[in-house]
């Protein structure tokens, strides 16, 4: 029986190949959507689990999480530096690390922060040592710059950046171990260097003369103000020792990454800073809402994929019925020679089911490779590791494909028995 089926498939190999490819492409779409949605969900969750609580200025929770956790460029409003001072000195807080954005270098975001956050992300550096002066930097594991290299920051992102700052050149002192987060592509520098580079001072520098200077600058371009600031202050003292003490005089920051000592402290702090001018959020909570949206998109794509498969299957069944009709004489001869009906049904069913099985297997492979390719490209641009793999639940999807293929293959098989052997031989 198997020999006869394989011989028949070899004889009509071009048509059989077309059927297998059509089935494979339709199955690959479903597999890609399923694997990719899971990879994005798991990868983003693992990246966010390193950050317990975010505190920023009142605004969009989603944008705050995307900017602070995934380092997506966005103009976040600044909150008062006094908030950072309170969090840093709060007995319920184990770590309060500010993050400052605005500059980039070699296509990588430059993030102002503290040694505490770096130690939290990467307890031990893979190379070099932690920065200890204003002009030093630690790079993420995916930054293709060696220790000892100098970095001249550019204002803005790689896409929107304009002039290069002349007041400072950071020297790389160390490299973090891989974290699987967007911070693997970041260049981390002391937050005070970012403040000074952009002319940000605490409240102790805010006096009447400062107000007059701000009024004078109001009608001037950002570039003119930056050039005048760098001309007035000259190069920043890159050898100045690191100062990570924060109080009420601290300049404003877009976000603070907080690590509470207990779960109860986390909820109290979140509630405390969700009023007035500040916003406290759990990144995992924000991601849950994003997952709901992602799940809706996945359902839509799966519905499209299933609709595509239904059209493909219907076309294949029709072509197969026509093919069986063209072989009526051969089937009639087999029946006239006394071949059992079950053998004829098994012959036609087996031939079509083999094509379905080959298409499903090829589709699974193609879908897996497509998901790997998409995840690799996303990881290259975001540095977030997106794990692509099958789970036990996927067996239900694969089993469903096989069951549908087995049922549908019966239709052409029974269509081969509609006419009598005598009528088939006269045809």
Image: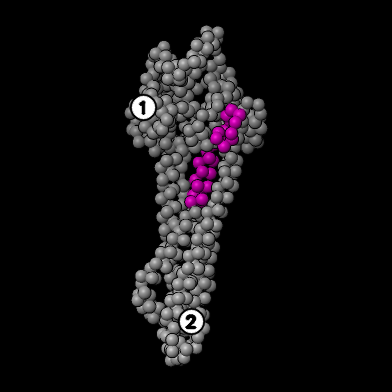
Q: Are marks 2 and 1 in contact (CB under 8 Å)?
A: no
Disc 1 secondary structure class: strand
Does the image show residue 361?
Answer: no
Q: Which residue is mark 2?
A: 416
Q: Nearer the viewer, residue 26 or 104?
A: 26
* Left or right placement of residue 43 versus residue 236 in this view: right
Disc 2 secondary structure class: loop
| Comparing labels 2 and 1, the label whose residue is closer to the camera | 2
Quarter of the image where the N terminus is located: bottom left
> Badge 1 local density, few (<14 within 10 Å), some, or many (20+)?
many
> Badge 2 local density, few (<14 within 10 Å), some, or many (20+)?
many
Q: Quadrant of residue 83?
A: top right
Whether residue 116 appears in magenta in the rendering, the answer is no
Q: Quadrant of residue 4?
A: bottom left
Q: Which residues are magenta?
A: 36-64
Whether residue 42 appears in magenta in the rendering, the answer is yes
Q: Position of residue 296 (x, y in %)?
A: 58, 50
Q: Nearer the viewer, residue 7 or 262?
A: 7
Q: Which mark is residue 151?
A: 1
For residue 254, above or below residue 218: below
Does the image show residue 149?
Answer: yes
Q: Position of residue 219 (x, y in %)?
A: 49, 15
Q: Position of residue 5 (x, y in %)?
A: 40, 78
Q: Which mark is residue 246?
A: none
Residue pictured at 58% horizontal, 29% vertical:
56
């Amino acid at each position: 029986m198997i020999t006869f089926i394989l011989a028949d498939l070899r004889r009509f190999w071009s048509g059989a190949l077309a059927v297998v490819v059509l089935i494979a492409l339709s199955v690959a779409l479903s597999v890609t959507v399923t694997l990719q949605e899971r990879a994005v969900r798991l990868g983003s969750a693992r990246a966010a689990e390193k950050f317990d609580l975010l505190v920023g200025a009142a605004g969009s929770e989603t944008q705050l999480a995307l900017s602070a956790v995934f380092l997506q460029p966005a103009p976040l409003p600044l909150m008062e530096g006094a908030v950072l001072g309170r969090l840093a000195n709060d007995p319920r807080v184990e770590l309060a690390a500010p993050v400052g954005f605005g500059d980039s270098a070699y296509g990588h975001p430059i993030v102002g922060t503290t040694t505490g956050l770096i130690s939290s992300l990467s307890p031990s550096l893979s190379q070099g040592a932690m920065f200890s002066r204003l002009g030093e930097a630690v790079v993420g594991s995916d930054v293709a710059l060696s220790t000892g290299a100098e970095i001249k920051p550019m204002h803005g992102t790689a896409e929107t950046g304009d002039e290069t700052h002349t007041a400072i050149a950071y020297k790389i002192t160390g490299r973090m171990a891989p974290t699987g987060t967007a911070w693997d592509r970041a260049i981390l520098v002391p937050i005070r260097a970012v403040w000074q580079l952009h002319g940000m001072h605490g409240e102790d520098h805010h006096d009447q003369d400062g107000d007059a200077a701000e009024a004078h600058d109001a009608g001037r371009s950002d570039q003119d103000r930056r050039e005048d600031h760098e001309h007035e202050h000259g190069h920043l003292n890159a050898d100045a020792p690191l100062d990570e003490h924060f109080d009420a005089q601290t300049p404003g920051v877009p976000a603070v990454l907080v690590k509470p000592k207990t779960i109860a402290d986390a909820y109290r702090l979140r509630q405390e800073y969700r009023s007035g001018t500040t916003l406290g959020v759990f990144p995992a909570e924000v991601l849950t809402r994003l997952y709901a949206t992602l799940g809706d998109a996945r359902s839509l794509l799966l519905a499209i994929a299933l609709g595509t498969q239904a059209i493909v299957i219907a076309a294949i069944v029709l072509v197969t019925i026509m093919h069986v009709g063209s072989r009526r004489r051969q089937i009639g001869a087999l029946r006239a020679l006394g071949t059992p009906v079950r053998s004829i049904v098994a012959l036609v069913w087996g031939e079509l089911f083999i094509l379905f099985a080959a298409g499903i297997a090829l589709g699974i492979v193609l879908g897996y490779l497509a998901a790997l390719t998409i995840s690799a490209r996303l990881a290259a641009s975001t540095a977030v590791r997106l794990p692509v793999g099958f789970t036990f639940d996927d067996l239900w999807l694969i089993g469903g494909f096989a069951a549908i293929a087995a049922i549908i293959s019966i239709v052409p098989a029974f269509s081969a028995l509609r006419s009598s052997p005598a009528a088939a031989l006269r045809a």
